[in-house]
Image (tube, rainbow, N blue to C red):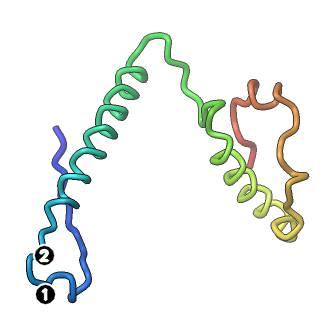
């Protein structure tokens, strides 16, 4: 079971305005988060599958891979962060498919 608490922040002038009604924010939050919850529940079911093979990242998480690689590289080679550019991106599709771990 999970309990979710949410707070909304509005500028003071919005709160003081005649007819201020934050229900649109609450309704939108509820709609989008219910969709997220369904996605999270689906992922949890997948992880529970006997066919699930754990790994740090999926092949669809290229941006996360790029960020983690950039951080790892900057620990190994502190000056490398400033040399990072589009040329550091993986060019081979095979590397993406075969990615199992990020070496640090």
Specify the quadrant of the image occupied by residue 15.
bottom left
Specify the quadrant of the image occupied by residue 60.
top right
Tell me the element at label 1: helix
Q: Residue at x 55, y 20 (%)?
A: 53
Dot 2 corresponds to which residue? Answer: 20
Mark 1–mark 2 distance (CA, rounded to whole Å): 7 Å
Dot 1 corresponds to which residue? Answer: 16
Is residue 88 found left or right of 53 in the rendered image?
A: right
Tell me the element at label 2: loop
Q: Nearer the viewer, residue 75 or 71?
A: 71
Q: Are marks 1 and 2 in contact (CB under 8 Å)?
A: yes
Q: Residue at x 87, y 38 (%)?
A: 91
Q: Residue furthest left?
A: 19
Q: Residue at x 18, y 52 (%)?
A: 27
Q: Nearer the viewer, residue 17 or 53?
A: 17
Q: Position of residue 57 (x, y in %)?
A: 61, 36
Is residue 72 found left or right of 6 in the rendered image?
A: right
Disc 2 crowd rating (10 Å Cα; few below 14, some 14-19, many 20+) is few
Q: Position of residue 2 (x, y in %)?
A: 19, 43
Name the mark on residue 71.
none
């Amino acid at each position: 079971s999970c309990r979710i608490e949410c707070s909304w922040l509005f500028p003071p002038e919005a709160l003081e305005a005649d007819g201020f009604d934050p229900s649109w924010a609450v309704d939108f939050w509820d709609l989008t988060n219910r969709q997220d919850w369904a996605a999270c529940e689906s992922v949890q079911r997948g992880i529970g599958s006997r066919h699930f093979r754990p790994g740090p990242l999926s092949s669809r998480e290229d941006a996360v891979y790029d960020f983690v690689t950039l951080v790892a590289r900057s620990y190994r080679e502190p000056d490398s962060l400033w040399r990072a550019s589009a040329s550091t991106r993986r060019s081979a599709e095979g590397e993406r498919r075969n990615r199992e771990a990020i070496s640090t």
